[in-house]
Structure formats: structure tokens, C-alpha cells
Image: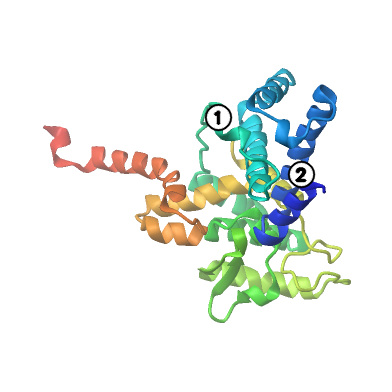
Amino acid sequence: MDWIESFIDYLAVEKKYSQHTVISYSKDLNDFNLFLRDSYGTLQYSEVNYGVIRQWIVSLVEQGLDNRSINRKTSALNSFFKFIQRAGTINSNPMVLHKALKVKKSKQMPFSKEEVYSVLDMLKEEGSSFENIRNQLIVELFYATGMRRAELVNLKLTDLQLENGVLKVLGKRNKERFIPLINVVRDRFKTYLTFRNELETIKDGEYIFLTAKGTKIYDTLVYRVINDYFSNASTKAKCSPHILRHSFATHLLNEGANLNAVKELLGHSSLAATQVYTHNSIAELKKVHFKSHPRQDS
């Protein structure tokens, strides 16, 4: 029996992991299998101990992988061993002794309001072609809703309720949430849909965002749109859809939005996931406090 294939099917069908995650797990586990074959020949999973796993980790370090990448691979392996342990293939999980490698946390700085507005002004000046109108809506939608890139790519026409000003979003683990649309985004949608309806060919008609050829947009296209425009407006090393999501949350919190409300808008399952965005709002609060508190002049 191919246990990796069974595990991947389990992730895709039962756990409903994204296609990107499933592909990553499959690659990581097949890499481990390749290591076992090259280093130990016919070693069975039941014969794998932590010494073997440690040797694999050493080989990954020698290949130049960073700790974050290695942790992702060992996390996939841990999940896999748990799966085959439940199936009775192994008696114990050799990963129980493993501790994740330390990763230096890098602070992801959001775009400033000025940078976001600069990009929106840039898009307005580029004219009224289908792609420009679409790209303008993509930027506006990320900044107005904080949705994830995969969520935007998979939006369907049936998810859009323009009259009610609401957008249904299908998040991680197929969890649905409803996000209110501000007026400027509703207007952008109306304009975009007019241009969309005038496309010569529409192949993936159920999806909102299409290429000029009428096919569903894809992850790298969305990344390229955000990266290209924001690289011209910002000096930040990373200009991605996730940073724009980060900006959405940070700017809301800076304006006094409730943390629980931001959590619901972002589609986080726990408040802890949302709290990573509070460091900038705390910095803003410190600035206001310093300027406004009556004791500062004493």
C-alpha cells in the first residue's frame, strides 16, 4: 500500500487542505522517501527511529535549506507518522522527540496609507482597459477586505451580493464568512463587471476575476499585480498580497477597530492569529499617548 498517496488523499478529501498545501506535503514526504532509499535501501517506516530523522535533517542543512523550510518538512513528516500510527502501520511516532528548529522572526511591515493611495492613483492614471480596471479592483478589494490571495482568486459571481453590499468568502477549511463592501469597492465592481461582460470569450464564467482571454486568474498573476505596482510606490523588500492583508488589519486597528471584529473579517480561527497585527497599532497608540498626555509637559 502506498501510504504517502493515502495520506495525501486524506489531506485533500477529508481535511480539505488547499491544493498548494497538498502539493507541498507530497513533495516533502517524497523527498524523505528518497533520502531513505539512498541512505538505507529498503528501510521500512516501522524501522525509522529519530536517529534516521536526525540524519535527514542534517542532510537538509547541508543542502543549504533554512530552518523555516526544514521545520515545514519535519511538520509534514510528523503529520504523516501520526496518520500511519493511527492506521496501525507503526507502534509509535519517532517524531515525538523532535523539537522545531529556532527561526528568527522577521517583522513584516505593512504598507503605509500613503503607499496604498499612491498605487490607487497610479492605477487611475493608466486608463480604462479591462486589465487596468481589473487590477484596480484587485488592489481595492485586498485593502478593503483583507482577504487572502487564494480567496480572491476563487471568488465566484454567486458570492457577490452587490445590492446588499456583501461578499461571501470561502476561507481555509472551507469556512465561509461574509465581508461588507464599502461603497468605493461596490462601484469598482460595477465598472469591472461591465468590462468583463464585454470580453470576446469567457471560458470560466462562474469566476469573478478573469484574464483578458476569459479564463480564471491564477495566484502568480495576482502576486505580480501587487508586486509590480507596490514596488513602484514602496521601498519595502517584500510587496505581496499578504502585506496588503497585513496593511488592512493594521490600519483598521490604528483607527480603533475592535480586535474581535478584525479577527472575523480576516477569517482567523483564533484571536492569537490576529494579535500579530497589533504591534503597529500599539506603536501608533504610544505616539498618540506621548503627544497628548497632559503629564508629558511636566
Farthest-out residue, bottom: 163
Find residue 277 and report its image quarter. Answer: top left
Rendered-image quadrant of the C terminus: top left
Residue located at (82% from left, 31% from top): 34
Establish if 134 lies above or below 122: below
Q: Element under label 2?
A: helix
Q: Mark number for residue 84?
A: none
Residue located at (71% from left, 56% from top): 10
Which of 202 and 268 lies nearest the eye of the viewer?
268
Residue located at (50% from left, 53% from top): 248
Side (left or right) of 247 relative to 3: left
Q: Which residue carries the number 1 mark?
A: 97
Residue located at (85% from left, 71% from top): 202
Which of 56 and 244 lies nearest the eye of the viewer?
56
Instruction: Name the mark nearer the viewer: 1 or 2.
Output: 1
Farthest-out residue, left: 298
Q: Which residue carries the number 2 mark?
A: 26
Residue 295: percent from the left, percent from the top? 13, 37
Q: Is residue 237 visible?
A: no
Alpha carbons under labels 1 and 2: distance apart: 23 Å
Q: Element under label 1?
A: helix
Establish if 3 lies above or below 130: above
> Of marks 1 and 2, which one's residue comes earlier in the chain?
2
